[in-house]
């Protein structure tokens, strides 16, 4: 069987590519700009092209057909409409990576199923994902376009760790604040429930859907089964670093307002995502992926990631603007306590 990955070197897709590269049943191709050759496993073939250059991609895939086309960098409806034009009649399955943030916010029930309504008034990213899903499912219903939709929750790899609040450069500055003994902002009271999944585990669920006729026309969220509070997530990171966690809890709506003028969209990433409980019913996925489970629990995954980040300078992206913003938020809240 032949699979084409659009992208293929990101947090989620790289783990899937590595898994399939070891499977003799699959011939694996990547379509990307070729900027991360070190992330391409031996035996994987590449089509060097920019997916946004539709004419160039049309020429590059002329005469080719695939058993699965796997999209990881489609964020807006025009991008999946382009994919539809490119791959209609050329693949037996088109797997679109959406997002679990598309589910109803705030949550209408304690446990999320694939039947949970898609609605997120707080985050444009999620609304765009919903619009992409709606276009693809309409093409499935009207024309039989063979779409499968997957909705990841918070998936991480060795190059990063999940944190509740971070700046534009990712979690490194939060890690540094912990190492420096500075307080770390945690949204709300830190007790909302969050599901984190190491990318190797995600790949098990994803590959079980590939080439599976029962997955056509269906949507699946893919997550591990480990659920933690944000307090537990940050404490686990601090434990792995061998430092004391100085948690500083701040209401999400305050963070959204305080971050807006600095360009931080915390209404989207917190009110529309991380500040909400995210607990998933995996029954539907496990019917097709019975081996899907957490094999890398967070206490192990956090250590894998931190060991890698601390030994790879390219993962250490300082963010002095975010660091200063955290200090201002904390100072303002401490001052307000004195004025009550």
Image (tube, grey):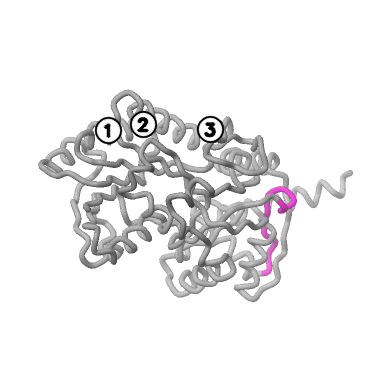
Is residue 221 placed above or below 25 in the rendered structure?
above
Q: Which one is in front, 237 or 210?
A: 210
Asked if residue 154 lies in the magenta stretch, the reply is: no
Q: Residues within 10 Å of mark 1 (few under 14, many from 20)?
A: some
Q: Which residue is mark 3?
A: 118
Magenta stretch, main secondary structure, is: loop
Residue 209, position in %: x, y? 37, 49
Residue 258, position in %: x, y? 66, 42
**Residue 242: quadrant of the picture:** bottom right
- Residue 58 lies left or right of residue 136; in this view the side is left
Q: Which residue is mark 2?
A: 136
Asked if residue 185 lies in the magenta stretch, the reply is: yes
- Residue 253 lies left or right of residue 134; in this view the side is right
The CA span between labels 2 and 1 is 8 Å
Q: Which one is in front, 132 or 326?
A: 132
Q: Residue at x 16, y 35 (%)?
A: 55
Is residue 178 placed above or below 71 in the rendered structure?
below
Q: Which one is in front, 305 or 135?
A: 135
In the structure shown, which secondary structural element does the residue marked by tag 1 occupy?
Answer: helix
Q: Residues within 10 Å of mark 3 (few under 14, many from 20)?
A: some
Q: Residue at x 45, y 33 (%)?
A: 128
Q: Which residue is mark 1?
A: 84
The stretch of residues the image draws in magenta is 181-191
**Name of the residue lying farthest toward the top:** 142
The CA span between labels 3 and 2 is 15 Å
Circle number at residue 1? none
- Badges 2 and 1: C-beta atoms under 8 Å apart? yes
- Residue 41 lies left or right of residue 16; in this view the side is left
In the structure shown, which secondary structural element does the residue marked by tag 2 occupy?
Answer: helix
Confirm whether residue 175 shows in the render: yes
In the structure shown, which secondary structural element does the residue marked by tag 3 occupy?
Answer: loop
């Amino acid at each position: 069987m032949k699979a084409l990955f659009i992208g293929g070197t990101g947090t989620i897709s790289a783990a899937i590519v590595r898994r399939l590269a070891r499977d003799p049943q699959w011939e694996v191709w990547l379509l990307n700009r070729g900027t991360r050759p070190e992330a391409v496993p031996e035996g994987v073939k590449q089509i060097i092209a920019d997916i946004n250059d539709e004419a160039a991609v049309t020429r590059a895939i002329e005469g080719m057909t695939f058993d699965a086309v796997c999209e990881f960098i489609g964020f807006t409806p025009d991008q999946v409409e382009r994919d539809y034009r490119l791959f209609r009649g050329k693949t037996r399955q088109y797997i679109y990576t959406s997002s679990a943030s598309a589910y109803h916010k705030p949550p209408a029930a304690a446990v999320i199923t694939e039947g949970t309504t898609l609605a997120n008034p707080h985050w444009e990213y999620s609304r765009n994902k919903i619009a992409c899903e709606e276009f693809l499912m309409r093409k499935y219903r009207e024309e039989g376009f063979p779409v499968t939709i997957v909705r990841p929750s918070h998936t991480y790899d060795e190059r990063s760790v999940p944190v509740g609040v971070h700046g534009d450069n990712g979690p490194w500055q939060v890690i540094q604040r912990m190492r420096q003994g500075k307080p770390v902002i945690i949204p709300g009271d830190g007790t909302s429930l969050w599901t984190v999944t190491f990318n190797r585990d995600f790949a098990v669920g994803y590959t079980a859907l590939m080439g599976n006729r029962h997955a056509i026309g269906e949507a699946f969220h893919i997550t591990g089964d480990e659920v933690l509070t944000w307090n537990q997530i940050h404490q686990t990171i601090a434990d792995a670093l061998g430092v004391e966690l100085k948690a500083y809890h701040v209401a999400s709506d305050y963070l959204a307002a305080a971050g807006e003028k600095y360009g931080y969209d915390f209404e989207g990433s917190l009110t529309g995502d991380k500040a909400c409980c995210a607990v998933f019913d995996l029954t539907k996925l496990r019917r097709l992926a019975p081996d899907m489970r957490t094999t890398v629990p967070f206490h192990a995954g956090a250590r894998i990631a931190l060991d890698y980040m601390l030994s790879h300078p390219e993962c250490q992206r300082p963010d002095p603007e975010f660091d200063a913003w955290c200090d201002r938020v904390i100072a303002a809240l401490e001052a307000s306590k004195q004025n009550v």
